[in-house]
Image: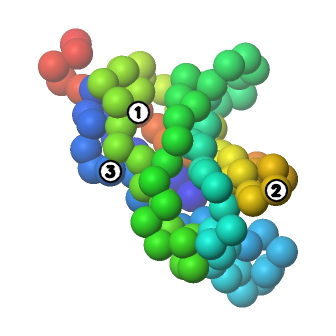
């Protein structure tokens, strides 16, 4: 899944539904009722190192796996393509990363004000 946004924007809120990776091919919503938190992790595509964004998301609909993130002022300040994953912490301390077979993509597109 790919998502595009303009450089330096802070809206819209990034809202996604996390899916159960083991439910292929008819993926179902990942029930987050027993999750203690979800983090958004975003880094430059193909690059190693620390993520540009490593922040807590808001669980908005736990049974249906829905989460949201309100962009910070510097989250989308650099044009480029970014790999995105979600790190879920479960009750008891277990950690699960979604998707488990790659990344989602966010592309930050040049803003005319930034030229």
- Looking at the image, is mark 1 or mark 3 nearer the viewer? 3
- Left or right of 20? Residue 70 is left
Mark 1 touching mark 3, by CB under 8 A?
A: no
Residue at x 69% of width, y 47% of height: 87
Which residue corresponds to mark 1?
A: 108
CA–CA distance between discs 1 and 2?
Answer: 36 Å
| Quarter occupied by the N terminus | bottom right
CA–CA distance between discs 3 and 2?
Answer: 29 Å
Residue at x 75% of width, y 20% of height: 48
Q: Is residue 6 above or below residue 30?
A: above
Residue at x 79% of width, y 81% of height: 23
- Left or right of 110? Residue 64 is right
Furthest-front residue in view? 92
Work out whether residue 110 can be spotted: no
Q: Is residue 2 above or below residue 32?
A: above
Q: Residue 21 in the image: x percent, y percent?
A: 78, 69
Which comes sooner in the sequence, label 1 or label 3? 3
- Left or right of 42? Residue 113 is left
Which residue corresponds to mark 3?
A: 13
Which residue corresponds to mark 2?
A: 92
Mark carried by residue 72: none
**Foreground: 10 or 112?**
10
- Secondary structure found at label 2: loop
- Secondary structure found at label 1: strand
- Secondary structure found at label 3: loop
- Looking at the image, is mark 3 or mark 2 nearer the viewer? 2
Badge 1: residue crowd in 10 Å (few <14, some 14–19, many ≥20): many
Q: How is the image coloured?
A: rainbow
Which comes sooner in the sequence, label 1 or label 2? 2
């Amino acid at each position: 899944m790919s998502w595009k946004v303009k450089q330096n924007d802070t809206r819209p809120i990034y809202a996604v539904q996390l899916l159960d990776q083991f439910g292929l091919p008819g993926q179902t919503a990942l029930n987050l009722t027993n999750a203690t938190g979800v983090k958004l992790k975003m880094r430059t595509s193909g690059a190693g190192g620390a993520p540009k964004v490593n922040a807590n998301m808001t669980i908005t609909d736990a049974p249906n796996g829905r989460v949201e993130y309100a962009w910070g002022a510097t989250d989308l300040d650099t044009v480029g393509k970014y790999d995105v994953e979600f790190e879920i912490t479960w009750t008891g301390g277990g950690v699960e990363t979604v998707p488990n077979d790659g990344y989602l993509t966010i592309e930050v597109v040049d803003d005319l004000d930034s030229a």
